[in-house]
Amino acid sequence: MKTTHRICVLPGDGIGVEVIEATLVLLEKLQQGSGFELRFSTHAAGALHYKTTGDALPEATFEAAKAADAILFGAMGWPQIRYPDGTEIAPQLDLRFRLELFAGVRPARMIPGVAPILADPRAKDIDLVLIRESTEGLFASRGKGVVEADREARDTMVITRAGSERVHEFAFRLAERRKARGKPGRVTCVDKANVFVSMAFFRKVFDEVASRHPAITADHHYVDATALDLVRKPWTFDVMVTENMYGDILSDQAAALIGGMGMAPSADVGHDHGLFQPCHGSAPDIAGQGKANPTAAFLSAAMMLDWLAERSGNEALAIAAGKLERAVDAVYATGSIRPYELGGKDGTAAIRDAVLSDL
Ligand code: NAI
Ligand code: MG
């Protein structure tokens, strides 16, 4: 039976608009003659919207995102557009908190044919997923940090039992699903439990959750050593789970390992909502030039289709997700496409057309 899904599209700022435009072309193609229908509706939000209206995330946009079956997101933010306290406009953070998108899923898989960043031949085996807790941690302090008398500033890390349990549980379930597909079945808790009580608590809850998943190997790694090993031997990681700020940093590092921000997809999911977006920002340095690599956005759309498949039970969506992923792989495997980001001459339209023709 054909299923219908409402997709709230939030292109946002800069190259967010460019990569989403390209992604919608592929999704339209995928749904032609398929067993599902995607109903897209595009809504305004972001830094430029804030500049013209004083509102970064209009309530109508938030309500549309909340009511939708999934949210497809470009990028938001612009370094020169800021709130009076000096911080940037970041509706993506508001959405994570307000829709309780607690699991930031950041896969880093080396696509065959993409010029490797690391010289070690084992780099072709990089296939890890970083889970970034996205509703608390150091980001709990967002909008609440204090500066006292221009002398001292403070941001506080908040780790709750409920927040940790749900994200660890998510990581173990993911490791189980990956294990069924031949992956090692391991979850690494990335923390700083040697120094901070908040992180020792995060680890303690991790160990409790781990005991409920005996088929999965559970281990721990300090965040600084993780930064080292992500360069030294990233192919040894399977699923990683970490606090919000550490995950913010390490997921950019993981993106670099597979070719840059334009290659790294992500999903922000909770129990009730899912938002899918490339890991990158609005890239003001290349915005408006047609140079953005849309691959991360394509792969994020594939994650969205997969997620909708699981929630609706409609296998047609999972098939489309697989098709899209394989088309991206096929395009890079031929070696004919090389994004600007990787020293090539292929921009958004060329990469879109290559994937489209494979589809
Ligand atoms: P960025 O991800 O926009 O750019 C970092 C570097 O990677 C730049 O050199 C950029 O040209 C390059 N890059 C990023 N995506 C690319 C792509 N698809 N193809 C080719 N090259 C790409 O991060 P940056 O510069 O720190 O932030 C720019 C703005 O975006 C800021 O306002 C920031 O707050 C916002 N931002 C928003 C995010 C979101 O919406 N989720 C995430 C990260 C940043
Ligand atoms: Mg970031």
Image: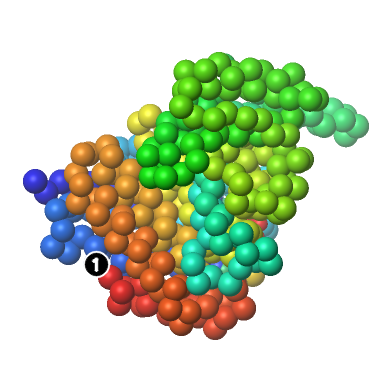
Q: At 49% across and 36% down in the image, what residue appears? A: 185
Judging depth in this view, the residue of 12 and 56 nearest the camera is 12
Q: At 64% across and 70% down in the image, what residue appears? A: 285
Residue 33 location, quadrant: bottom left
354 is higher (above) or lower (below) than 195: below
- Position of residue 23 measured from the top left corner of the image (x, y, whole percent): 37, 64
- Position of residue 138 measured from the top left corner of the image (x, y, whole percent): 68, 31
244 is higher (above) or lower (below) than 47: above
Q: State whether residue 73 appears in this view.
A: no
- The residue to which callout 1 is attached is 29
- Position of residue 115 measured from the top left corner of the image (x, y, whole percent): 58, 72
Judging depth in this view, the residue of 62 and 335 nearest the camera is 335
Q: State whether residue 246 appears in this view.
A: yes
Q: At 72% across and 53% down in the image, what residue appears? A: 232
- Position of residue 31 measured from the top left corner of the image (x, y, whole percent): 20, 60
What quarter of the picture does the C terminus occupy?
bottom left
Judging depth in this view, the residue of 314 and 57 nearest the camera is 314
For numbered disc 1, what is the local secondary structure? helix
Residue 258 location, quadrant: bottom right
Q: At 67% across and 63% down in the image, what residue appears? A: 120
**Ligand 1 positioned in quadrant:** bottom right
Q: Is mark 1 within 8 Å of ligand 1?
A: no
| Crowd class of label 1 (few under 14; some 14 to 19; many from 20; radius 10 Å) | few
- Point out the residue furthest to the left here: 1
Left or right, 82 with reference to 294? right
Q: How is the image coloured?
A: rainbow
Q: How many marks?
A: 1
Amino acid at the residue labelled 1: Lys
- Point out the residue furthest to the right here: 151
Judging depth in this view, the residue of 61 and 259 nearest the camera is 259
